[in-house]
Image: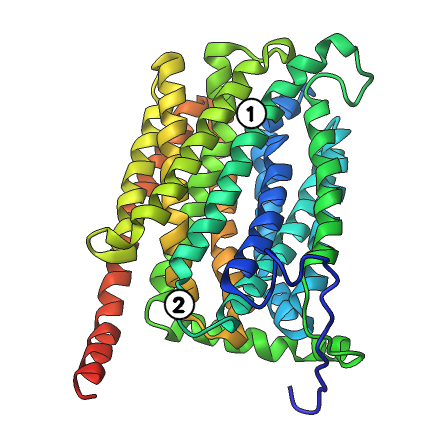
Amino acid sequence: MSGTRVRPRRDPSSAATGVLSLATERGVTARYALLAGLQEFAIWLPLPVLVLHMTDRGIGLALIGMAFAVRAVLVVLLEVPTGGLADAIGRKPVALASQAATMTSFAFLLVVTGPVTLLGYALFQGVGAALHSGALDAWYVDRLKATGPDVDLQRNLAAINVAQTAAMLLGAAIGGTLPALAVGLDLPWPLSGFGVALLAGLLLRSLVWWLTVVLVVEDDRGPARWADALTTPAIVRDGLRLAWRIPVMPWLLFAGGAMGLAMVAIETFWQPIASLTFGADPATSAVYGALGFTLGAAGLLGGLAVMRYGDRFPGGPPALAAASVVVKAGAMLLLALPLGGLGVALGLAFGYFSIAVQNVPHDALLNDAIPNERRSILLSVNSLVFFLGIAVGSGVLGPLAGVAGPRLALGLGAAFTLAAALAYVGVLRARRPADAGVRATSATR
């Protein structure tokens, strides 16, 4: 921005010149892997019992679905403006505001007793999620690219994915087991039942907020930083224009919407489906810890598989993403069928394996197509359609599950997810002219 004096900001972390150095590709990835992994751990501590916590407080699936829909609609309304804000004033302050809003949302959920506190959770969750996307991810990719011209984006994103899925594994296993371990302690409300897992996640989120202050270092724009917020509308307009004009973007955005619908369908309905087989008693919640470990281990295996073999997949990232969508749809269908505990375990395992595999090539295709100066806004556009898929899935499948049961709702989600594999065929076709141009240019040198 013309007239803005940018001053280098000192790195406050003591490991700045060591393993977490911002000057090297490995250091930047290690720093972000630590931060993203702990954040994922905080997310997954309460997640294996999240829906059970709400139903244990007397909230039905239809109302839960509507709360998730409210959250998603709020994200859709705020997503693009907050992405533009991150490009304008910096990614760090937006990320810190996001984490503060998310902590507030889980404080509401910890004491949830009915529609009012559930709405408070949904509203703060929506604000936090809208601020989150396009902030720290954009900071990481920009820092990574600044370390050298030959950075392997997919390999580094796969390393981040492995750190997140390892944290997911631990968080899901521990969080699912915590209520059973705490039963003998006779904890008071709101920690009784499944609430202890929510408190653990809330405390860990406060640690992540502090680490973001320490580890995320940006150039200091000084007093002009907040004046730059006035440029947000222009950035938003430019980002929306690029989302339409970059050939692969419409296809990737459609795939992102389908990812959102599939994610909310799995996360909302797997616990009610599992409870039909295993029950929903906090004293026996260890089975949900085991299922959480299963889905976390599958996600970790998927991330490791992409990091080790992703570059060798025939057809490249678009084909890998498309294949993972097909596996995910099949896993959702398997989970929806009345096949007992083994069906639940296998459905979760294949589902989260394919989610981890799809995320890496999708994010690599996305970040490879967009310019650095509009990275936050375009990542926010991608997140917008992701949450639009969540809104549609929650608003339609949640009430359906309340009437016809969670199995049918998840089965319908699987059918739509399968159709989304065609989006990556469109990505492959849109990339061919650009790839041909690169080959032709190389041949004339």
Q: Can residue 27 be seen in this view?
A: yes
* Residue at x 33%, y 47% (from the top left corner): 308
Q: Is residue 389 visible?
A: no
Which numbered disc flags the more N-terminal residue, 2 or 1?
Answer: 1
Helix, strand or loop under label 1: helix
Q: Which amino acid does label 2 sit on?
A: Asp
Q: Which residue lies furthest to the right in this view?
A: 188
* Residue at x 68%, y 74% (from the top left corner): 219
Residue 183 on image: x %, y % = 71, 11
Q: Is residue 66 above or below residue 220?
A: above
Tell me the residue that label 2 is attached to: 368
The alpha-carbon separation of the residues under discs 2 and 1 comes to: 34 Å
Q: Is residue 9 above or below residue 16?
A: below
Q: What residue type is labelled 1?
A: Ala
Residue 395 on image: x %, y % = 52, 40
Q: Residue 192 carries which label?
A: none
Q: Nearer the viewer, residue 62 or 19?
A: 19
Helix, strand or loop under label 2: helix
Residue 137 on image: x %, y % = 55, 59
Q: Is residue 313 above or below residue 68?
A: below
Tell me the residue that label 1 is attached to: 173
Q: In this view, does 433 lie to the left or right of 100?
A: left
Q: In this view, does 240 lie to the left or right of 235?
A: left
Quadrant of the rendered image containing residue 230: bottom right
Q: Which of 376 and 442 is in front in this view?
A: 442
Q: In this view, does 87 lie above or below 77?
A: below
Residue 343 on image: x %, y % = 35, 18
Q: Which residue lies furthest to the bottom in this view?
A: 3
